Amino acid sequence: MLLVGCGTTSQDISTNGTNHPAQTSPPPEIARFAIGDTVIVNFSGLPSGDPLVASLHQEPIKDDGTISLPYIDSVVAAGKTAGELQTEIHDLYVPKYYFNLTVTVSSGDRVYYVGGEIKGEGRNLYVDGTTLTKAIQSAGGLTDFANHHNIKLIRAATGQVITVDYDAALQSPAEDPPVYPNDQINVSKRLW
């Protein structure tokens, strides 16, 4: 007997009812680096003559998910948090190259995307605490032709599709899902 399963790459979740997107999307996703994100690595705590002193390494993550650093070449950054990458880089340098080294990793600007029936569609700078309604309002709001009841939020990290009723989200914070870096918001045109 042959059993066949079906897998999907995305889910369509509605905010109506008991399945709230804020509960289905764990916060750790917001801090993970993705291909194209800029990684900033600051090295400190070294003697003044060392080439890494006052060295600020800034690089976008390449298509293979890596960044390149002096002495240690490529390090996989995609999929890691700043803290995980910081620890890994530190451990690659200490004690092999240095006995005393402080490594600080941060990200460059993070963005999300808003498109469709929005007055100011395009890239927007991500700020912690951004929700779907805040993202739409910061993009100039909905056009007169926007479908308020069928807004799609597409999670960059998982491909999950969340359907949101904008009017309900304005009335209830539980219906207003968080937006994370690289997420996409698409507002369709109403039919009538």
Image: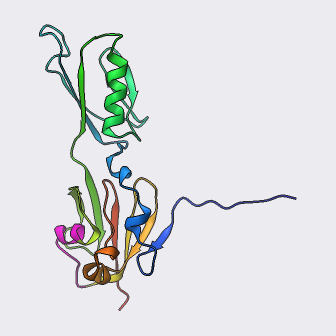
Total numbered labels placed on residues in the image: 0
Residue 187 location (% of width, % of height): 33, 74
- Does residue 145 appear to the left or right of 164 in the view shown? left
The quarter of the picture where the N terminus appears is bottom right
Relative to 38, residue 75 above or below: above
Residue 135 location (% of width, % of height): 23, 66
- Does residue 192 appear to the left or right of 51 in the view shown? right
Relative to 98, residue 1 above or below: below
- Does residue 152 appear to the left or right of 5 in the view shown? left
The quarter of the picture where the C terminus appears is bottom left
**Residue 176 drawn in magenta:** no
Q: What is the residue that sits farthest to the top in this orientation? A: 49
Look at 31% across and 30% down and name the residue there: 86
Relative to 79, residue 43 above or below: above
Q: What is the residue that sits farthest to the bottom in this orientation? A: 192
The colouring scheme, among rainbow, by chain, secondary structure or one colour, is: rainbow
Residue 92 location (% of width, % of height): 37, 19
Look at 71% across and 60% down and name the residue there: 5
In which quadrant of the rendered view does residue 133 lie?
bottom left
In which quadrant of the rendered view does residue 38 lie?
top left
Residue 97 location (% of width, % of height): 31, 10
Can see residue 61?
Answer: no
Can see residue 156?
Answer: yes
User: Foreground residue, 140 or 71?
Assistant: 71
In which quadrant of the rendered view does residue 166 lie?
bottom left
Look at 23% across and 85% down and name the residue there: 144
User: Magenta span covers which residues?
Assistant: 134-144
